[in-house]
Image (cartoon, helix red, strand yellow):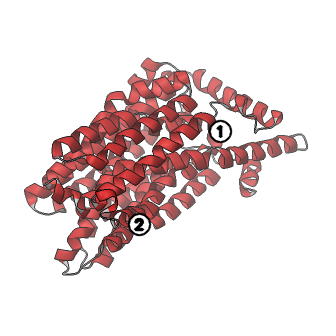
């Protein structure tokens, strides 16, 4: 016990330093990333849709074509990150997407919007799976759910802070002679370029090179991660072996890809169309909202979602990740999203959508702790990118199909029932995967539970 105490102290300080030094910065990068890719959702009901004469289907296609661009280069981009290192590659991604995002300020046609959205996806390709891979390479698996949970907080908080920010920027109509939605695009793009430059100097590719860790902390992290990778590559299961081919032929990887498809289908149906749905409350309920009113209402579901994410991942870290940590929220989200259609007031509708958002965001960081348990090296880079590619396909499908079905049927009933179906499918597949392979983590031993309690 006495010999374990110094090791436990080194573990505690090493994980704390990674949590403080790396996670907030990478989360800030994700915050800007998600704000840039969803900025069109704030622009469309606040002038862009009218100025570019967009139908719901055209807006859905413009929102979704981003993901086609992302898909084109996602796996190659993550393999490049594995080869060249996160510092160079994530910095490169941020600068290029910031430049493309800046060009939205001067878009003047639906065709131009489609082109820029596609190029934005190409520029951003690999950022999210690259960030997941990067953080996974800094901490052992027993700490990964917690670290990814802290990172993932950036996504719901982007809307909590980004929606009012977007509304405030849109309110500056006429600045530099630009419409309000163009002012928004101008000012949300510059941070990506600046962060990309800073990332080049700030990020470090691996613990062995981190001068802000003590020698004991560097040695402990390096040894723990090496031992973990050795266990994965030495396992008899062919899917655990660290080569590219096995990642693409792994049944578990493909099942997880479909599970992730369902979650992301729901995530982006909400992200891109919630501001438009809220804008429709004015006619549906004979009320009037200002631009800032709509921004604040859009932000409402995401603050409880961030809180749910934090405590859900904390529970999974303390007690071991279980199948129900992913499947349970999928069921809740799949049931509540159609129920929102039958509420009789804006307040009740937003309340139910808040439950849906809590379910989606609680499950996602826990889900991302699963692939790295059986993939390592190049296989991890390819497998994570492949799973995220399925998410990008869902992003395109949910954006375009939701808009198309709304134009075809005249309302959001059918599109949101489809969202519910895909989320319930994710729950079923996650349970089936658990029945065929061990996906649950063992509960932490008392020593690690005590270590966690000290954080």
Residue that sits furthest to the bottom in the current view = 286
Q: Is residue 276 visible?
A: yes
Q: Which residue is mark 1?
A: 139
Say the numbered circle drawn on residue 164.
2
Residue 82 percent coordinates (x, y): 53, 25
Using the image, determine if residue 82 lies above or below residue 27: above
Toward the right, the furthest residue is: 2
Q: How many marks?
A: 2
Quarter of the image that includes the C terminus: bottom right
Residue 445 appears in the rendering? no
Looking at the picture, does residue 197 appear above or below residue 378?
below
Q: Secondary structure at mark 2?
A: helix
Q: Looking at the picture, how far across and down is residue 420, in whole percent?
A: 28, 56
Query: Quick one: SS at disc 1?
Result: loop
Q: Quadrant of the N terminus?
A: top right
Say the numbered circle drawn on residue 165.
none
- Left-right relation of 152 to 171: right
Is residue 419 or residue 36 the one in the foreground?
36
Q: Position of residue 255 (x, y in %)?
A: 37, 36
């Amino acid at each position: 016990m006495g010999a374990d105490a110094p090791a436990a102290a080194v573990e505690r300080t090493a994980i704390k330093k990674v949590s403080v030094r790396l996670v907030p910065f990478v989360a800030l990068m994700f915050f800007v990333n998600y704000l840039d890719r969803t900025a069109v959702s704030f622009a469309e009901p606040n002038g862009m849709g009218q100025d570019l004469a967009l139908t719901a289907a055209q807006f859905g296609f413009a929102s979704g074509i981003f993901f086609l661009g992302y898909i084109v280069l996602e796996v190659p981009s993550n393999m490049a990150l594995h080869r060249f290192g996160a510092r160079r590659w994530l910095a490169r991604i941020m600068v290029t997407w910031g430049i493309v995002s800046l060009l939205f300020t001067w878009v003047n046609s639906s065709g131009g919007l489609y082109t820029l959205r596609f190029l934005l996806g190409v520029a951003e390709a690999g950022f999210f799976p690259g960030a997941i891979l990067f953080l996974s390479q800094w901490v052992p698996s027993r700490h990964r759910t917690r670290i990814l949970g802290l990172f993932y907080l950036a996504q719901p908080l982007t809307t909590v802070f980004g929606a009012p920010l977007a509304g405030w920027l849109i309110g500056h109509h006429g600045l530099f002679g630009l419409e309000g939605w163009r002012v928004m695009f101008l000012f949300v793009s510059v941070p990506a370029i600046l962060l990309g430059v800073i990332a080049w100097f700030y990020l470090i590719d691996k613990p062995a090179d981190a001068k802000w860790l003590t020698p004991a902390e560097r040695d402990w992290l390096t040894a723990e991660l090496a031992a973990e990778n050795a266990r994965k590559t030495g396992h008899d299961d062919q899917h655990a072996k660290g080569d590219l081919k096995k990642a693409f032929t792994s049944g578990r990887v493909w099942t997880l890809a479909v599970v992730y498809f369902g979650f992301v289908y729901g995530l982006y149906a909400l992200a891109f169309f919630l501001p438009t749905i809220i804008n429709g409350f004015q006619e549906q309920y004979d009320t009037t909202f200002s631009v800032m009113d709509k921004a604040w209402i859009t932000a409402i579901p995401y603050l409880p979602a961030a809180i749910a994410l934090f405590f859900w991942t904390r529970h999974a870290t303390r007690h071991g990740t279980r199948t129900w940590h992913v499947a349970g929220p999928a069921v809740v989200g799949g049931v509540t999203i159609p129920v929102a259609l039958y509420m009789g007031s804006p307040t009740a509708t937003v309340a139910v959508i808040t439950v849906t958002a809590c379910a989606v965001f609680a499950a996602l960081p826990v889900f991302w702790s699963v692939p790295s348990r059986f993939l390592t090296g190049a296989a991890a880079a390819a497998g994570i990118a492949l799973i995220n590619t399925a998410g990008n396909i869902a992003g395109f499908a949910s954006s375009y199909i939701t808009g198309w079905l709304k134009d075809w049927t005249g309302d959001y009933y059918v599109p949101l029932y489809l969202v519910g179906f895909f989320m319930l499918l994710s729950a079923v597949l996650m349970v089936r995967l658990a029945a065929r392979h061990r996906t649950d983590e063992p509960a932490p031993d008392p020593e690690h539970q005590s270590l966690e309690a000290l954080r």
